[in-house]
Structures are given as C-alpha cells and as structure tokens.
Image (tube, rainbow, N blue to C red):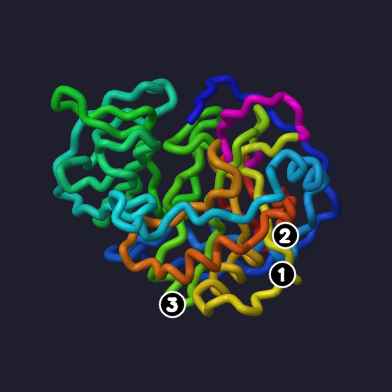
Amino acid sequence: MIRLLAVLALVVPTTALAASAPVPSAKPIAGTSCSEFPADNWWRADVSGLPVHARSRQWLSHMSTGVDLHPDFGPSYGDGPDYGIPITVVKSSHRTVSVRFDYAGESDRVRYPLGADTRIEGGRGSDGDKHAIVVDQGTCRLYETWNTRIRDGRWRAGSGAVWSLKSNDLRPEGWTSADAAGLPILPGLLRWNEVKADDIDHAIRFTTDITSKHHLWPARHDAGSRSSLAYPPMGARFRLRAGFSTQGFSPYAVSVIEAMKTYGLVLADNGSPWFFQGEQSSHWPERLIEDLEQIPASAFVAVDSSALKVSNDSGEVSSD
C-alpha cells in the first residue's frame, strides 16, 4: 500500500443533481449495541438515483473493466485462515497499548485496545496489509490499523485511526487512515450476517491498481501515481447498472447485487483491480463466492455523490 503525504484538491465538473432516497435506520454491529456510524452517514446513502459522474467513462477506461469482480474474502481451501478482514469486539475494560506508527504525523496517537485477542488480516505472519479492526462495545469507538505487527514485544503499525461510531466527523483533510482514502474500513466490509438476512445497507469497499493523486469527499487522502483527473480518485463511488440481470444467481448473491445497485462500491485503496472486501468468516458459502466472481466490472458506472454533501468535514448526507 503506497502512502503519499502530499494531497491535492480536486475540482471535478458535475452533471445535474438528483435527490437521493431516505437513508435507512442504522443497525447495530454484531455483538454490540453500536451502530456503524449514524443512519445519515455517506456509506449508507442510496445512490441509485444519482446522476452518472461526468468523468465516469474516463475513470473506467483506466480500471481494467474487462475483468470480473473478485470477492477478496471467503473460503481458503485449507491454505491459511479464511480470507477477509477480521473484526475484533472488545469491552471498555480491555487493556490498551501504545502503538508506534510509521506515518505518525497522520495517525491518531492514542492508546489502542490491542492484545492477544486482536485478529489481524491474514494472520500475524502475513506479508499483506495486516489490517486490524477493533470495536470498543462500551464506548462505541472504532480503532483501525494498517500493517499491524509486534516487534520486540511492542506494537507497531503503518498508520492508525480512531472514530466515534456515534459521529459523522471526518479525519483532518489530508490525513490517511488504515486505508489510503482516509476513510474507515469497517462500514465498507460485506458481512455474512447481513448477506444471510438480506439486509445489506451500505456501500462496499474496493480497490484498483492505478489511481490519481486526488480524492473526493468524504475521502481525505490519496495515494495515486497519476496527476491526471482522468484516473479514478480515492472516494469515487461506482454503481452497478440497474438493468444488470440477477437471473441464475443464488439468493445470497442477489442480495449483494441489489446492494451494489443501491449503495455501490467505494474506491478506498490501491490494490488489485475490482477486488472488493468482506469480513473474515468461516461461514461464507462457496456458491456465493463463485456467483460474485461472475459480475463484470463493465457493468458499473461512477456516480456523482456531491449533492449529498452537507459539510466538507462531515460524512452526513443531505436528505433533500
């Protein structure tokens, strides 16, 4: 994951604006009474009625749209832990530790509730992103770290960010998080319980390989290699075309497809093109994963979500 400290402002032309549908009520995170941010948060906004972004075609031309989507989670077939980003829920009494960050200037330098029970993406010996996502169920605070490891008995990470799940406040402009876009990871993860219940109420995090050195609200940071606005910026939101047929897909896959039509995908990090993320769970059905691998990237368009913005420093969306 490439991290750049320089942040450039993005000026993007917009098309005619359309009103969004009302946001659903916020449901609690499994195992807690905490919601995944307020009900009017941008991650939960219905974008099915928003206009196609003026740069949609340009962005997609640089995003390997000849491939199908890749669910970056699911069964590992005996090769290590199940794929996905794990979520750890702790009590407020959990011991906290200091963490040394590689990007300390853009990290929240507080004590984090990490310990032997902390689940790390790919396992502690992974050579991947090693994300750790921890929810304090008592205070409803979210702690996220990237490149999380222990060295000489001390916790280290590439970067770290903390959010109140009760607030729409964004990180300072220009700051990264555990994601290149400076956004939280948790609200963009697909989870088995919500798929099983046909109750997906949020956009889904995904990656692509070549991005611009720009970002769109509510993203706060970028890590791209291209200065041109023709390349997709962090925070760009993509919607599956309404006419995409669900015929032949399993009911669980249909639930995900409908969520992609309603809430879409959010470009949150650099990585393999059209890899989208879910939680680590041993319950993901093999048929669901196979179905999701049949969704073509070419069936997506970028949407203009600027009409949803209430404030530059808030993830709250307008209901007008």
| 183 over 71 or under it: above or below | above
Q: Position of residue 266 (x, y in %)?
A: 59, 50
Q: Residue at x 65, y 79 (%)?
A: 247
Q: Is residue 191 magenta?
A: no
Cα separation between marks 2 and 1: 7 Å
* First-in-chain label (2 vs 3): 3
How many labels were placed on the picture?
A: 3
Residue identified by numbered label 1: 244
Q: Amino acid at mark 2?
A: Ala
Residue 302 lies, in percent from the top left, at 73, 51
Measured in 3D between alpha carbons, the distance from the residue under mark 2 to the one under mark 3, in whole angstroms, is: 25 Å
- Residue 135 shows up from this direction: no
Circle 3 packing at 10 Å, graded few (<14), some (14-19), many (20+), is few
In the image, what residue type sits under mark 3? Answer: Ala
**Nearer the camera: disc 1 or disc 3:** 1
Numbered badge on residue 197? 3
At 62% across and 59% down in the image, what residue appears? Answer: 264
Q: Which residues lie in the magenta part?
A: 216-230
Amino acid type shown at disc 1: Phe
Residue position marked by numbered label 2 in the rendering: 299
Residue 119 horizontal side relative to residue 198, left or right: left
User: Residue sitting at 71 percent across and 49 percent down?
Assistant: 65
Q: Which residue occupies the foreground of this view, 81 or 116? A: 81
Q: Quadrant of residue 89?
A: bottom left
Work out whether residue 7 or residue 26 is closer to the camera in this orientation and state it: 7
Badge 1 element? loop
Q: Residues within 10 Å of mark 2 (few under 14, many from 20)?
A: some
Residue 258 drawn at (x, y percent): 61, 71
Pointers 2 and 3 in contact (C-beta within 8 Å): no
